[in-house]
Amino acid sequence: MDNLSEPTWRNVLANRPAASALGLAPKAAKRTSDARSGATPGNNAIPPLRINLSEGTLVDLRRRLAATRSPRGEAVNNFSQGMQLAKTADARPSMSQDKPVVFVVDDDRSVRESLESLIHSAGWCPKVFECALAFFSLPRPSVPNCLILDVNLPDISGLDLQSLVSVERMDTPIVFVTAFGDVAMTVKAMKAGAVEFLMKPFHTEVLLAAVEEALKRSRTALEFDLEVRALQDRHESLSCREQEVMALVVSGLLNKQVAFELGISEITVKAHRGRVMRKMEAKSLPDLVNMAARLGLAH
């Protein structure tokens, strides 16, 4: 993702209604959180909302999230990047031509509206939700994206949602925002891969910087996934025998050893090996070994 230009930053920072709404009045934010947690005035140690989920609920949430995965693309003969590119069913022109998407999951309406305005003014596409299940219902995008996530949610906690997203949506980095948190909560979120953990109220420029970093990570993950899908398509184009030869070759066996393992002649092995190199578009044996490692075939 291109960095925000100086004029864009100034335009965003000049957007005082959004910025001021993000900087929630401490007392109002505290009253909202107190009402949720049932804390009494003067008690600073407010425990985060914890919801014990049954195994059945977790299975259902994983099913919902898995249903939003992008479909496997069919390979197209486009070697402008040195490999075949995957083409999804909706035939998007290219990842770089679509606006990055910034998801927001926060049960505070004023925060959602303020973040929506700020994200839009920064040139990204905002999509806001008040709970985790609403977020699950939206199909995952095929463009760089990230999630601005509150810790306390009405259905499941933000930390529980993070554990699901980190498995099913590795291309969706998370920026946490919360009115109340502690060191243990911050450490847990960061160890699980969060880009940033911000306390409300926060400076808009800090949030924008965190979102930029998250979108860069998302772009890298999507590009890696695209490359792996192209490699998978090439590997699937190999015949069964060619796949067997490739697996033995990348394991370090010589042609005569491969021939012995498969019960065929060394000349036949060389012929299969040559076709494997061409179909996989490998320039050398180390290149083929690296491809096998990315596909999880190397031992």
Image (cartoon, rainbow, N blue to C red):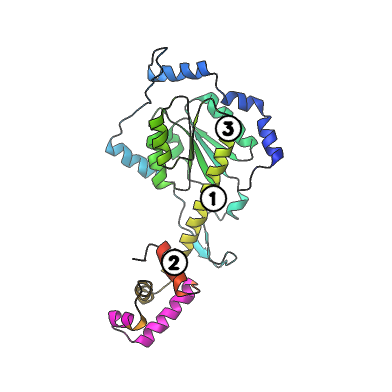
Secondary structure, mark 3, is helix
Left or right of residue 239: residue 149:
right
Q: Residue at x 42, y 83 (%)?
A: 271
| Tag in front: 1 or 2 | 2
271 is within the stretch colored magenta: yes
Q: Is 248 situated left or right of 24 in this image? A: left
Q: Compared with residue 18, is residue 139 higher up or lower down, i.e. above or below?
A: below
Tag 2: residue type? Asn
**Local SS, label 2:** helix
Numbered mark located on residue 188 in the image: none
Quadrant showing the C terminus: bottom left
Dot 3, crowdedness within 10 Å: few (<14), some or many (≥20)? many
How far apart are the alpha carbons under marks 1 and 2?
22 Å
Q: Quote the CA–CA distance across marks 3 and 1.
A: 21 Å
Instruction: Determine the residue positioned at 36% across, 44% down.
Output: 63
- Give the residue at x 28% y 79%: 261
**Residue 142 x, y percent position in the rendering:** 52, 50
